Image: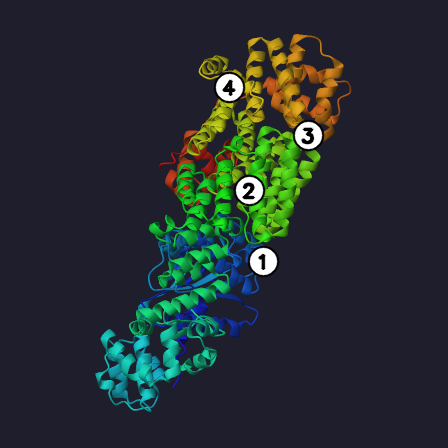
Amino acid sequence: MPTSVAREALLASMKENALVPLTLLTAPAGYGKTTLLMQWHAALRQQAPDTVSAWLSLDDADVEPNRFLAYLILALDQAGVELAHLPHLAASQALDVQPRRTLNALLQALARENRVITLFLDDYHLAASPEVSALLSHLLEHAAPWLHWVVASRTPPDWPLSRWKAKGWVHEVCAQALTLSLEEARDILGADLDATALCQIHKATEGWAVAVQLARLWRTSNDGSTYGLSAFSGGVADVANYLTTHIFTRLSEDCQSLLLQTCLLQRFNADLADAVRGRHDSAEQLRQLAHLDTLLIPLDPERQWFRYHTLLRDFLRLRVNSRQRQSIHRAAAHWLAGQRDWSQAVHHALKADDIPLAVNLVVSAGGWELVLHHGIRYAQSLLQQFDAATCSDHPDLLLLQAYLHAKLGDHALSTQLLQRASGKVVGNARLARDLHVIQTLAAAYQDRLDTLDAKTLTVHAHSSPLDQTLAQATLECVLALAALTRGELDASLRSIRDAHVKMRVIASPRGENYCRIHEAQALALAGRVDAAGVLLEQALTFATQQFGQESSLRALVGCFKARHLYWQGEWAQTPPWLEDGWAALEHADGWLDIVAVTAEVTWRTRLRSHGLHAALLELNHVEQLANARQWPRLSGLVQAWRIDAWVQGGQLPTARQALLQMDLERTANCAQDWRSQEAATLALARMQLQSGFSAAALTRLRRAATELETKGLLLPAWRLRLMALAASSKVRTLDAKDTAQALAPIIQYGLPGLLLEVGPCLLPALLEYPTPPPMLTSVIKRLRGWRAHPMPAHSVLSAKERQVLSLLSHGQSNKAIALALDISENTVKFHLKHLFAKLGVDNRTAAISAALRQGYLDASL
C-alpha cells in the first residue's frame, strides 16, 4: 500500500494556475498540505528539470523578521538564485537592522536574475506576525513577475487577499478541496479492502487525510487485517489511543527512544538527533521510520530535516518527564551553539530552565560585540527571549541592553542600565573591561565627548590579548571622534588609523567602515578633500559589497557623500542620499557629528530649492531629534542655523528678535567647539552683513577663520574666508591677493558649493577675479539667477497634491487614488511628479518620509 496518494485533480488545478503569483493552501492540521506541496514540487521538477524552485519550512522562531528573511534568502541561494552579498549576511545573521532595506536588496537581485522562481513555504502560520506579514505582502506585490509563491498555512495569512483575488493573483486550495475522495482513500488503504469497510472508514474520518493514513497503518500493523477497524472513528481521543496501542508500542526500543528524545525539537536532522540522544545511529533509525512520513514529516525533498505532526508530537511530549526535558533542551542548546545558531541555542537553554547557560551562550556569541558583528536586530532578538528579571540581573545582558539603547538614542535608559551593571562587575576583569567600553560608547552617543581623553584608551587586563582587540579598537574610534569634536585632527587621524588596523585584524567589516567614515571626516576638515573623497568612495564600495546597496551602513556613508556633493555644487543630487541617510539615522544608528553634517546639508539645500518654510520645517525636525536624544549641542546648532535661514530668507526682524533670546555671541567665541563656533559665526556675520555692519562682520569672520586655521581646520576656515570676501567687497575695494587666496582652495579642489553657500552677496568679489575658470563662470551664472529670482518663502503643496499625499500615505495605489479623487491615473501620475519635485524625492516611500518631516503629514495618524 502507498504511504501517500497522488492528488491528481489538485495537481492538475495547480498546473493550470501555475502562473498565478500565489497558490495558497489553507487547512487545519492533518489535511495533507505538506504532502501536496512536495508532490507539486516534484511535478514541477519532472515537467521542467531547469525549473528554479526553493523550499522553506518555517517554525515559530521565524516570527522575527530578520531571521525569516535570512532563511528565505538562504533557501533562494540554495536553489541557485544569484543574490550577491545577501547569502553571506544571512548565513552570519548580519542582515540590516531595517528589514525593508534587505527586502529592497532582494527585489533588486530578483530583478537582475529576471527568471521565474517558485518558492514553497510550508507551515507559514508558525512564522505569521504583523512584521513578517508586511514583508511578505510587499515582496509578493513587487516580485510578482519573477516569484511564484506556494504557501501552506493552517490559518489564512494576514495579507490583502481580497484585493489580490480581485486581481486574479490567488489560486486557493481549502480544507474541503484537500479532503480525500473515496477513490483516494481506497488508493491509500489498499485495493483489497472490501467496499463496506472502505465506506465505513471514509465516512468515519470524513476524508481527513491523517486519519485515513492512521487506518492504513492499522492495517499494516495487523498484516492487512480489518479487525478492529469498525471501532475506528478518527476522532482525537481515538487517534491518541491508536498511537499508544498500534504505532508507538510496536516500534523497536531504539526507534521509540529516538521519537521521545527528539519530540521537543521544532525541527531536527540526524546530527542534532545524535547530539540530544548521545548516540550515532539516528540516521539509520530515521530510515527505519520512513513509513511514518505522515507523522514524521520530511521538511525537504532530500529528507535531511524533519518535524513532527502535531498529533504525534503532542502524544510524545506527554511521555517525556521534566528531567528528560532539561537534558534534551540542554544538549540541543550546545549543538546549536556549535552551529552558531545562537538564537535557537538560547531558546533551548531557556527551555531547559538553565539561565546561566543561556547567558553564557550570549557571551560566547560575543556579548555586546554582537551588535558590531551581527547588527542591532540580531542582538535584540536574543535579548527578547529573556524575561525582564533576568535582563535586569545579569551584567552581560545589562551591558548589551545599555549599548543598544545608547546606539538607538534612548540615553536615559542606557545610563540607568550602566549604573545597575556597575555594581555587578566587581572582581571580574572581563566585565569591568566591557563596562568601561560601553560607558565610553554611551558617552560618545550621548555627545559627552568633552569628558573623554587619552585615559579612555586604558583597557582592563583580561586573559588573552586577542580578547582586547575589539575593545581597544572601539575605544580608539571613540577617542578619534572626541579629538575630531575638539578639532584635534592629527590626534584623531592617529587614533582612527590604529583602530582601523585592529578592526581588520579581527575581521570586523562594519568596524572597518566606521573607521573609513571617521578618517574621511578628519581629512576633509583638514582640507584634504580629494583624499577624503577617495576614502569615502572606498567606504561606499565596501558597504555595498559587504552589506548591499540598500544597507543602513551604506546610508550612513551616504550622509557624507551628500556633503561632498554639496561642496561640489551638485545640490540637486543630494536628496536621495539625504533621505536614505535620515532613515538610517533615525531608526538604526547615529551620533551627533553625522547628524549635524546631514542636517546642515539638508536645510541649506532645501532653503535654496524649496524656500524658507521648507528649510525651517527641516530644522524643526532636527530640533525634535536633538530633544529626543538629549543633545543640547545640536539644539544650539539649530538655533544658529535658524538665524542664518531667516536672514537668507529675508526675515531679518524675526532673526533679530530670536537673537535676543539666545547667547549666540558666546557660542561664536567658544573655540573649544569648532562646529558650534563656525555655525554661530556664519549666522552672526550674515546678519551683520544684511544689517549694514559689514566691517564688524569682516572682523568677526577673519578672527574666527584664523583660529580655525591655527587648529588645522582648513575647510571650515575656507567657508568663513569666503563669507569674509563678501563682507570685504562691501567695506572697501577688494584686494586681488585676498581674493586669490580665498578662492585658491575652492578652485584647486573643485568646491563651487561653498561659493553658492555664501549666496549672491559674493558676486562682486567673483566678478573681480581675472579670467575666471569655467567653474567660477558657472557659479557666477547661477548666482545671478538667484539674485534675479529670490528664493520663495514657501513651497506650498496644492490642495489636490495634499489629497494625493494623504492617500499615498495610506498605501493607496495610483488606481485607488484615481478612483478616490475621480481623476485619471495619468492625472495622478502628473500630481505625483510635482509632489516628488516639491518634496525633493524620487519615490513614494521617500515622499511620505519627507512629508512627515516637513509637517505635511501628521505622524500621530
Amino acid at dot 2: Ala
What numbered label is drawn on residue 527? 3
Mark 3 or 2, which is nearer the eye?
3
Residue that carries the numbered disc 4 in the rendered image? 643
Please report contact status of discs 3 and 2: CB closer than 8 Å, yes or no: no
**Which dot marks residue 303?**
none
First in sequence, mark 2 or 4: give its number. Answer: 2
Q: Specify which label sits upstream in the sequence, 3 or 1.
A: 1
* Residue at 41%, 81% in the rendered image: 289
| Residue placed most toward the observer, 730 or 19 | 730
Q: Residue 18, image x and y in percent?
A: 46, 65
Q: Report the residue marked by disc 2.
A: 555
Q: Earlier in the sequence, mark 1 or mark 4?
A: 1
| Residue occupying the far left of the picture | 231
Q: CA distance from mark 3 to mark 1?
A: 43 Å
Q: Is residue 126 above or below residue 38?
A: above
Of the numbered discs 4 and 3, the one sitting upstream in the chain is 3
